[in-house]
Image: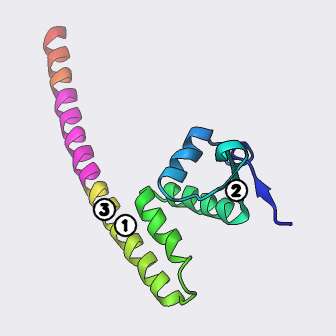
Amino acid sequence: MAITYTISDLAKEFDLTTRAMRFYEDMGLLQPQREGAGGRNRVYTARDRTRLKLTLRAKRLGLSLVEAKEIIDSYDSPRDTAPQLRKFLAILTDHRKKLEAQMLDLQANLDEIRTHEKEAKALLAKTEKAKAA
């Protein structure tokens, strides 16, 4: 018999809320089976657990859930790794370029702040020197 998990099992293991788990399901990242009266109980498989683990790893890299889903779904296709790797590389390259642009913006902001700090310190020193005289 295959190992299965409840929503609480996986939420606890990955330090998530059950609400987050349901959101990932709504996004199509997880596809639990339904059991019990009216299909109220979610039953997760080892595949769902792996998909959740990959989703969280993608989030740590800063990828969107849509990007994570694209990558993860590519592994459900036939096992030709070239298309999977091309897709993965395209997403990573795009994400890297976005981060590099953000880093340039942040660097420009930091440079501007340093300039204003330097000017404010000079004005403060001038004001304190005039006050002391």
Q: Is residue 118 magenta?
A: yes
**Residue 105 seen in the current view:** yes
Whichever of callouts 2 and 1 sits on the residue coming sooner in the sequence is 2
- Tag 1: residue type? Arg
Residue at the spot 19% in from the left edge and 43% down from the top edge: 112
User: How far across and how far down the image is residue 108, in percent?
Assistant: 22, 50
Dot 3: what SS? helix
- Decide if residue 133 is on the left or right side of residue 77: left
Residue at the spot 24% in from the left edge and 52% down from the top edge: 105
Q: Nearer the viewer, residue 97 or 30?
A: 30
User: Magenta residues?
Assistant: 105-122
Q: Nearer the viewer, residue 8 or 133?
A: 8
- Decide if residue 10 is on the left or right side of residue 57: right
- Decide if residue 70 is on the left or right side of residue 72: left
C-alpha span from label 2 to label 1:
33 Å
User: How far across and how far down the image is residue 130, in percent?
Assistant: 13, 14
- Tag 3: residue type? Lys
User: How far across and how far down the image is residue 77, in percent?
Assistant: 53, 81
Q: Nearer the viewer, residue 25 or 67?
A: 25
- The tag on residue 44 is 2
Dot 1: what SS? helix
